[in-house]
């Protein structure tokens, strides 16, 4: 809502505050002021001039040579505007004036003839083109009112105004009107404000002789009032009204349209003027639209209507979409002389549906949608009639023809000062509360500390004790509330175990050199199903899709973090950032249903993606590209940190390298995978070899057992033995190590692989793996014999299970 | 014999002096002190001496031996030290060459901010609560005093999956769920950080996915001044003790009264500048007293219980604190952006 301070001044005394101070006060107590701006740049030396004569320039076809009386002197001015004519009153910038854009007006010679100033267009004076009456857009501005020659044109045109823009929250619809703003500002400044009475002088004829009103759906339209104004003369509206419309960002059109717009701005009540002679019938019927009914609206659009839309009809066909837009057929035009003026209350929901369906958000629909003041509907109609009498030569007919089931009863709210103070933490006295109510112009009856407040209907947002609490608090001033801390039993704040583990894992991965990312949960259909872990795929029927996505790119919920993570790598590689190690801990969305009906399972998953060099230290010739074992090491390190035993089994997954991928198991269950991205996908993303991990973080965290008891450091030395085994080349080293551990139990505590060899001195198709075994008993020193025996058992076991031979 | 010994001594000492390296010195040692050396030889001839002379000469021979040995040792130490100096000299390196790089990863800036907020509120006795990102219409809207058809639903156009399920538009449903969980009689003191989603076209100031941290306190006798006190403590710790706060009226369907909290502008100290659009204040979060309808729907009697709630956007805080100028940076994951904030 744009508020002209010159206009506001007509209601409330704001002379003691600068515009900035006023804006600050309004923001602090009521409504956020989004901007304060002068309507135009500050100008001087622009006066009203009377064009005494206007002749063609001797040396230029398109220029005119004018003699202009500017009060006390006559200036010779050359003007190129097409609409200049002798006899006009115009705005003249005299030499010495500076127009917007630092355009200095000086005496000059144009094609050999002297010119002493400039006749201005409104654009040249700084008015926004969209607000300028159409007839003056392409030429100079011409005063249509009686104005005195030589007076300050800046003031006359209201170009010295300041405009504040209010950012209204949905509850403060009352301030969608200048009267509402006036009440608000008066309360804030503790100034008096009483709106003027509307006064009309009806003629003898009765409106009810010309029109009748029928409302079929009182719920949607509890009040409809029809005024008849005859013999209007369409013409320009008065300068002051046009100034106010321009200040509010509304383009002046003609007196009738301007008057309805003006009343809308002043009262917050939208009105609609029909051309009575083009209305075709003598009855107004308000009803729901019929299926397949159409209307051509003012903007010449043919619109299809539905029974959800409330329409005004002439008993035959729709003449307006209620509260949204009028029809073209009954529009007021140049030749209109008799007017049917509608003042109505439409139910907010009905207007919202229609304005949404037709994509029509107007000043009118915005106000109806938020609810207008039921006690201002008729008054606004009367006000428009008053203005039509004064400025359009209108004859207002006796009476308003109405359908009326509107509830105009103000709400009553009980509050006590002790309840208010309890909730605010203040010690506001009864007197102060009474004073606040007086400033707000809320009626009340007081019995001791109990106030029964009668809330004016303009404040439809105030219904509950809490609403009154807000009214008292904001006028009292939030700055005046004390600072306290909540009492009551204190509670130990803290992180849950899972929250702690999240942080622990993040810190680990970051310490290991990975950067955390946050990618979008919404992805495209293809990526949503890509790089999904085996167990997730088994549970999820399909990736969940949005009912109405904004774009294909963000249409489905992810089942894996990896696709978006790889896209991030790709983005960076395209920007010459080639060595990357990323991880993300985030949610994936698993629905067991093809057609989702219940909330999906949300699973916390941990993913990583690494590409380029893992180590790069050129001058010492150290360089290592990331590989499978880098990623496996990272995952194993994390398992160590969480005290979990993970196992890895060769696996084949779509979009993963068939020979370099492993499912990750925890306690016999697959919880994710690691490996290299399939070279085809790598190519598509312009990535070099890229390795990833994708794990169910919830499983990791659930299996974590916090090590509570201290474990003694072993007192007895361990004995180390090496063995090299020759096996088939496709044998899995991890499985052999597992066999060794089992066969060597309980003495073998650890097995480490320290060499893998293939080639010379070995049979084709064989490989040799060297293991380092650690034997230990925490309670005593082992005897050689025991170690020998265990060793024998191990050799037997690996031979049996893996056909492993001791390398000679 | 005495002369011979003294002659040997000066001869040997001279040779020690002339020895340039350990090998030469060793040769001197062997030549003079060895079993076949001249001093041994002299001592062998002692039998010819008188009883009186024998100890004298013996003593002298020992002295000579000792003095030669000492000289050799001293010289040896010197030579060894020199040799080591030489070796160390040769081992010297260019200390200005770069070290072997250690990978340093880091948290995402939003995580840093969220964890900082979490830690501040944990310090004030708050729990951290989480909830689903795909929410029911009930918890996302209805339980928060936004019944179907409520105009404020327009304010946050949402991503629906079905008529009843949508991507949550705020983390407030976690508050509603927490209150339900506590069954209408236990006190609540929690914050809920998380991702939220709205139908916005991504641009410099809008993102269809962003994060929120909301908080809720419900108990008997919670006052609006408590809200002011808690938020003031938070703002001072998060943004600096010299920053002031102010509350001003606003509107949220789930709180009444509703306020917006501003902090004084750091750039201009409240004088007004381009950062604060001339007002001296910067909007940080929305808050208010929990609406009685919300309390009631969660099973709390609004006559006995009251509470306050607040919500803020980590993106906005990051943009203010670190001057990030485009919200899309948070989700593009440009390594150059991520690395900048490791030290944040
Ligand atoms: Zn500032």
Image (cartoon, coloured by chain):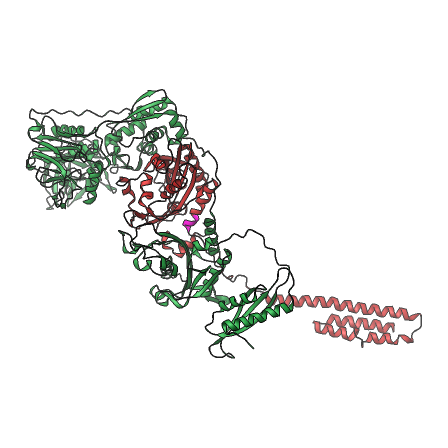
Is A706 above or below relative to A336?
below
Q: Quadrant of the C terminus of chain A?
A: bottom right
The question of residue B108 being in magenta is answered with: yes
For this orientation, the residue located farthest to the right is B51
- Residue A300 appears in the picture as rendered: yes
Which image quarter: residue A626? bottom left
Number of marks in the rendered image = 0
A196, B148: nearer the viewer: B148
Is A638 above or below relative to A122?
below
Q: Where does residue A646 sit, x and y in percent of width and height?
A: 47, 60
B276, A138: nearer the viewer: B276
Q: Quadrant of the N terminus of chain A?
A: top left
A538, A449: nearer the viewer: A538
Q: Where does residue A362 sit, x and y in percent of width and height?
A: 20, 40
Is A4 above or below relative to B28?
above
Q: Is residue A190 left or right of residue A264?
A: right
Which image quarter: residue A10? top left
- Residue A36 appears in the picture as rendered: no
Q: Where does residue B152 sit, x and y in percent of width and height?
A: 28, 40
A53, A797: nearer the viewer: A797
**What colour is chain A?**
green
Q: Which residues are magenta?
A: B106-112
Chain drawn red in the picture: B
Q: Where does residue B11 sit, x and y in percent of width and height?
A: 79, 73
The question of residue A535 being in magenta is answered with: no
Which image quarter: residue B151? top left
């Amino acid at each position: 809502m744009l508020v002209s301070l010159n206009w506001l001044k007509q209601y409330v005394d704001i002379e003691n505050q600068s515009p900035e101070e006023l804006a600050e006060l309004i923001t602090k107590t009521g409504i956020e002021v989004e901007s304060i701006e002068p309507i135009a740049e500050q100008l001087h030396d622009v006066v009203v001039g009377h064009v005494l004569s206007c002749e063609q320039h001797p040396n230029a076809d398109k220029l005119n040579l004018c003699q202009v009386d500017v009060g006390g002197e006559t200036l010779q001015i050359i003007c190129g505007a097409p609409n200049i004519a002798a006899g006009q009153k115009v705005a003249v910038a005299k030499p010495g004036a500076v127009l917007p854009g630092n355009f200095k007006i000086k005496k000059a010679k144009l094609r050999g003839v002297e010119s002493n100033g400039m006749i201005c267009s409104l654009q040249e004076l700084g008015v926004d083109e969209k607000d300028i009456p159409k007839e003056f857009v392409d030429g100079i501005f011409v005063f249509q009112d009686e104005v005195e020659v030589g007076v300050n044109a800046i003031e006359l045109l209201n170009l010295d105004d300041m405009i504040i823009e209010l950012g209204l929250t949905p509850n403060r619809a009352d301030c969608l009107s200048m009267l509402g703003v006036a009440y608000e500002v008066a309360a804030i400044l503790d100034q008096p404000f009483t709106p003027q009475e509307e006064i009309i002088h009806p003629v003898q004829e009765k409106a009810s002789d010309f029109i009748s009103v029928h409302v079929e759906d009182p719920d949607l339209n509890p009040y409809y009032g029809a005024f008849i104004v005859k013999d209007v003369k369409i013409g320009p509206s008065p300068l002051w009204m046009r100034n106010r419309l321009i200040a509010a960002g509304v383009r002046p059109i003609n007196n009738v349209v301007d008057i309805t717009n003006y009343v809308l701005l002043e009262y917050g009540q939208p009105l609609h003027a029909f051309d009575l002679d083009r209305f075709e019938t003598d009855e107004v019927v308000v009803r729901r639209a019929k299926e397949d009914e159409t209307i051509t609206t003012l903007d010449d659009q043919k619109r299809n209507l539905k029974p959800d839309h409330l329409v005004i009809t002439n008993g035959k066909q729709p003449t307006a979409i209620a509260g949204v837009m009028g029809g073209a057929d009954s529009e007021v035009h140049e030749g209109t002389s008799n007017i049917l003026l509608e003042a109505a209350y439409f139910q907010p929901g009905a207007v919202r549906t229609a304005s949404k369906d037709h994509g029509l958000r107007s000043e009118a629909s915005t106000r109806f949608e938020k609810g207008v003041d039921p006690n201002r509907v008729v008054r606004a109609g009367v006000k428009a009639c008053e203005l039509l009498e004064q400025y359009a030569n209108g004859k207002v007919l006796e009476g308003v023809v109405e359908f009326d089931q509107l509830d105009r009863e103000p709400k009553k709210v009980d509050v006590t000062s002790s309840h208010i103070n309890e909730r605010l933490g203040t010690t506001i006295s009864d007197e102060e509360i009474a004073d606040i109510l007086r400033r707000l112009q809320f009626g009340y009856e007081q019995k001791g500390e109990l106030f029964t407040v009668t809330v004016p209907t303009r404040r439809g947002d105030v219904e509950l004790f809490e609403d009154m609490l807000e009214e008292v608090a904001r006028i009292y001033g939030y700055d005046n509330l004390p600072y306290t801390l909540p009492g009551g039993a204190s509670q130990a704040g803290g992180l849950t175990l899972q929250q702690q583990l999240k942080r622990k894992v993040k810190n680990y991965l970051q310490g290991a050199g990975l950067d955390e990312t946050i990618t979008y949960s919404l992805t495209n259909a293809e990526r949503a199903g890509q790089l999904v872990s085996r167990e997730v795929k088994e549970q999820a029927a399909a990736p969940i899709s949005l009912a109405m996505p904004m774009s294909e790119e963000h249409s489905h919920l992810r089942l894996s973090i990896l696709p978006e993570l790889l896209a991030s790598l790709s983005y960076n590689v395209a920007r010459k950032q080639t060595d990357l190690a990323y991880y993300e801990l985030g949610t994936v969305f698993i629905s067991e249903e093809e057609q989702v009906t219940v909330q999906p399972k949300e699973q916390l998953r941990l993913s990583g993606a690494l590409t380029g060099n893992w180590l790069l230290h050129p001058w010492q010739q150290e360089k290592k590209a990331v590989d499978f074992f880098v990623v496996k090491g990272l995952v194993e390190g994390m398992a160590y940190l969480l005290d979990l035993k993970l196992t890895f089994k060769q696996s084949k997954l779509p979009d993963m390298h068939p020979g370099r991928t492993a499912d990750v198991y925890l306690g016999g269950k697959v919880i994710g995978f690691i490996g290299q991205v399939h070279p085809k996908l790598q190519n598509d993303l312009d990535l070099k070899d890229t390795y990833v991990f994708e794990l169910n973080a919830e499983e990791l965290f659930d299996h974590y057992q916090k090590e509570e008891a201290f474990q003694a450091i072993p007192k007895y030395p361990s004995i180390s033995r090496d063995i090299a085994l020759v096996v088939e080349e496709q044998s899995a080293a991890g499985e052999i190590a597992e066999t060794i551990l089992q066969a060597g139990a309980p003495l073998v505590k650890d097995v480490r692989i320290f060499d893998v060899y293939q080639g010379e001195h070995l049979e084709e198709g064989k490989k040799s793996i060297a293991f380092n075994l650690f034997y230990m008993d925490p309670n005593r020193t082992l005897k050689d014999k025991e170690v020998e025996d265990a060793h024998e058992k191990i050799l037997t076991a690996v031979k049996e299970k893996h056909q492993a031979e001791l390398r000679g | 014999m005495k002369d011979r010994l003294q002659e040997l001594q000066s001869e040997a000492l001279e040779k020690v002096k002339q020895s340039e390296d350990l090998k030469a010195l060793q040769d001197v040692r062997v030549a003079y002190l060895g079993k076949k050396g001249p001093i041994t030889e002299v001592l062998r001839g002692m039998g010819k001496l008188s009883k009186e002379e024998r100890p004298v000469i013996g003593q002298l021979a020992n002295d000579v031996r000792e003095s030669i040995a000492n000289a050799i040792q001293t010289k040896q130490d010197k030579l060894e030290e020199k040799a080591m100096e030489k070796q160390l000299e040769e081992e010297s390196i260019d200390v200005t060459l770069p070290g072997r790089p250690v990978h340093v990863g880091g948290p995402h800036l939003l995580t840093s901010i969220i964890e900082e907020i979490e830690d501040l509120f944990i310090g004030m006795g708050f729990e951290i609560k989480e909830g689903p990102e795909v929410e029911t219409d009930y918890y996302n809207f209805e339980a928060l005093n936004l019944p179907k058809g409520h105009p404020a639903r327009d304010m946050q156009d949402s991503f629906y999956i079905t008529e009843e399920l949508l991507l949550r538009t705020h983390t407030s449903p976690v508050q509603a769920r927490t209150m339900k969980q506590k069954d209408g009689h236990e006190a609540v003191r929690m914050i809920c950080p998380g991702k939220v989603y709205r139908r916005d076209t991504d641009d410099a100031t809008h993102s269809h996915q962003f994060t929120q941290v909301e908080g809720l306190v419900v108990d008997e006798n919670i006052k609006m001044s408590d809200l002011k006190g808690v938020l003031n403590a938070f703002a001072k710790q998060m943004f600096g003790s010299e920053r002031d706060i102010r509350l001003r009226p606003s509107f949220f369907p789930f709180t009444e009264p509703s306020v917006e909290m501003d902090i004084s502008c750091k750039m201009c100290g409240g004088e007004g500048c381009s950062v604060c659009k001339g007002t001296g204040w910067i909007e940080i979060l929305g808050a208010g007293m929990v609406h009685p309808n919300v309390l009631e729907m969660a099973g709390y009697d609004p006559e006995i219980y009251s509470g306050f709630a607040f919500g803020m956007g980590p993106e906005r805080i990051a943009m203010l604190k670190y001057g990030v100028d485009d919200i899309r940076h948070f989700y593009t994951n440009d390594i150059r952006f991520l690395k900048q904030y490791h030290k944040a």
